[in-house]
Image: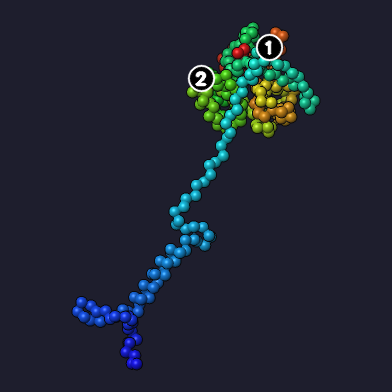
Amino acid sequence: MKNDIDDNEIRIIGPEQHDDHGTKLLVPKWCIVAGAVVLIAVVLYILWPFGKDGNAANTGNVTIPEPEATEPESLWYDNYDDSLDPQIIVADTVVDSLHLLVLTPVNAVPELHMGPIDVADTDILLAAMAADLRRDNNKIVGAFVLNGVPLSWGLSKRGYCAIIDGHITLGVADNSPLFEQATEQGGSFFRQYPAVDRGQMVLNNPENASYRRALCVIGGKVRLVVSTDRVLMNDFSRTLVKLGASDAIFLVGGTSNGWARTPDGGLLRLGTSYSKNKKYVNYIVFRKS
């Protein structure tokens, strides 16, 4: 059989195809090759959806990142006990040779007070100076809200105490939404040096030894712990952890004004040093409910 196919000709097997004028059609070789390459590329794109690293490519899947961890909600305390009258329970103890007083308010409402305070007011069961004052102008150090009114701003100390609707909470944070919450809900808020944060002691810079006071959460109740010996801040924080504090902030210490009214009606003085002329002197107070 004679081979009549030219070197540059590709003949289609099957019925011959003609153009509208009846002329036989011939397909160039390069068109067939180009079509085969395109067909192979399409097949590979459909059947090969994974890249070199094994991850799906262009599948339309979106990876949603996990939400960032958030701070746990604040725990609020009221030290309520319907079996007892409003009072301050006073206990003394020794931890690592350090003598301590532990004062526990029961059925007493916490609040902030600013200005001179009357020790003769028998409704006040416990009073202790709260936020520090600046030495240059005697104004409050750090953020401070009194009954919904912001009186001071700024972050100089990371510890905080918030009082809202008769409940109290303590914590350590650079920024706390409780400042705004206290402002919106008529509550109170102040800052102090942190002592214990979730069971861990917090280091502070001051190196002087002094009589220390701290507002603490111990055993699920808010308590005031007072050192009757001079002690460094960091040593006092370490002692509070051993005492079982889960959270604690310092209060104004030394011989600053303060007292507790004992169940028998007596007055336990914590200190008497204060200036009646300081407009912004402030106290945390526990009052009969």
Position of 182 compared to 276: left or right?
A: left
Point 57% across, 24% down: residue: 162
Name the amino acid, label 1: Arg
Give the residue furthest to the front.
15
Q: Is residue 59 visible?
A: yes
Quarter of the rendering containing residue 10: bottom left
> Disc 1 versus disc 2: distance between alpha carbons?
27 Å
Q: Position of residue 135 (x, y in %)?
A: 61, 21
272 or 101: nearer the viewer: 101
Residue annotated with mark 1: 261
Residue depicted at 47% across the width and 61% down the height: 49
Where residue 269 sits, quadrant-wise, is top right
Q: Residue furthest top?
A: 120
Q: Please give the name of the residue rendered at 50% of the width and 47% of the height, measured from the top-left corner.
A: 64
Element type where label 1 sits in the image: strand
Residue position for label 2: 186
- At label 2, the amino acid type is Gly
Q: Judge the density around disc 1: few (<14), some (14-19), many (≥20) Cα neighbours within 10 Å.
A: many
Q: Give the percent coordinates (x, y) of residue 169.
A: 60, 25
Q: Is residue 140 above or below residue 35?
A: above
Image x and y of residue 100, in percent: 75, 21
Numbered label tally: 2
* Residue 142 in the image: above or below residue 83: below
Looking at the image, the residue that sits furthest to the bottom is 1
**Residue placed furthest toward the left:** 21
Residue 158 in sight from this viewpoint: no
